[in-house]
Amino acid sequence: MEVKVLDFNGKDTGRKVQLSDSVFAIEPNNHAVYLDVKQYLANQRQGTHKAKERAEVAGSTRKIKKQKGTGTARAGSIKNPLFKGGGTIFGPRPRSYSFKLNKGLKRLARKSAFSIKAKEANIIVLEDFNFEAPNTKNFINVLKALGLENKKSLFVLGESNKNVYLSSRNLKASNVVTSSELSTYAILNTNNLVLLEGSLELIEENLSK
């Protein structure tokens, strides 16, 4: 599929680029997308939750009342989970939520995400640009020129660009990443995907393996 190339002022440069159909025009695999997004979100969890169980609660170990003749159930410890202040039964323990996915499935998920964005016409191809120094106002001007000032956007660079990244860092609705940092979640969790020309070849090369 062909997409016109815009400059950072939002004007048509008169050039077009050919996006690979094997990356941007496949039939999306929704289950692969689901698994990749699930893995990404699972990896964000710290898994440091912990509740004290019976053996870990502070308290006396003496038998709190005699075994028989009280008319109530027998009880051997104040740390019994049935009592207030006692331990938690099967409480949460520190654990890792991460799980493994094959590289082929993750590539399929990213290609599916790209294809979904392309089908929705939410991909913008922008010529490579740079700022002389970090300046949030300059980045906001780029967003306004592209009509993205009130939309969630993701800018994908071919290589790290400190000035562009720092210029966008204070803006909650806009993120700047390199092509190697892209994830299925990031692609789908945005209204518009802005691909700089320098990133296209790297994206297609990485996902065509």
Image: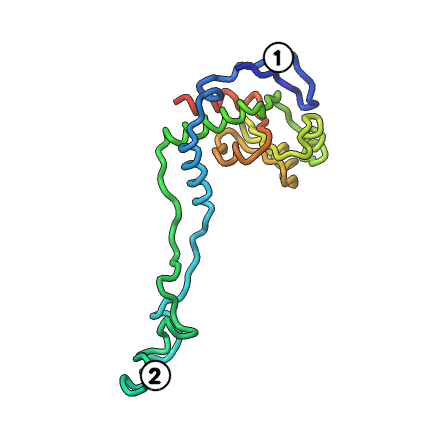
Q: Which mark is drawn over residue 64?
A: 2
Circle 1 residue:
15
Residue 154 x, y percent position in the rendering: 58, 32
Residue 199 x, y percent position in the rendering: 53, 24
User: How busy is the neighbourhood of tag 1: few (under 14 within 10 Å), some, or many (20 plus)?
Assistant: few
Name the residue at 48% across, 20% down. Answer: 25
State whether residue 80 is above or below residue 146.
below
State whether residue 71 is above or below residue 53.
below
Name the residue at 67% across, 16% down. Answer: 12
Residue 5 relative to residue 92: left or right: right
Residue 68 relative to residue 3: left or right: left
Disc 1 residue type?
A: Arg
Label 2: which secondary element: loop
| Spatial separation of the CA atoms under disc 2 and disc 1 | 84 Å
Disc 2 residue type?
A: Ile
Quarter of the view holding residue 29: top left
- Residues 123 and 140: in front is 123
Residue 50 x, y percent position in the rendering: 42, 61
Q: Which residue lies furthest to the front in this view?
A: 71
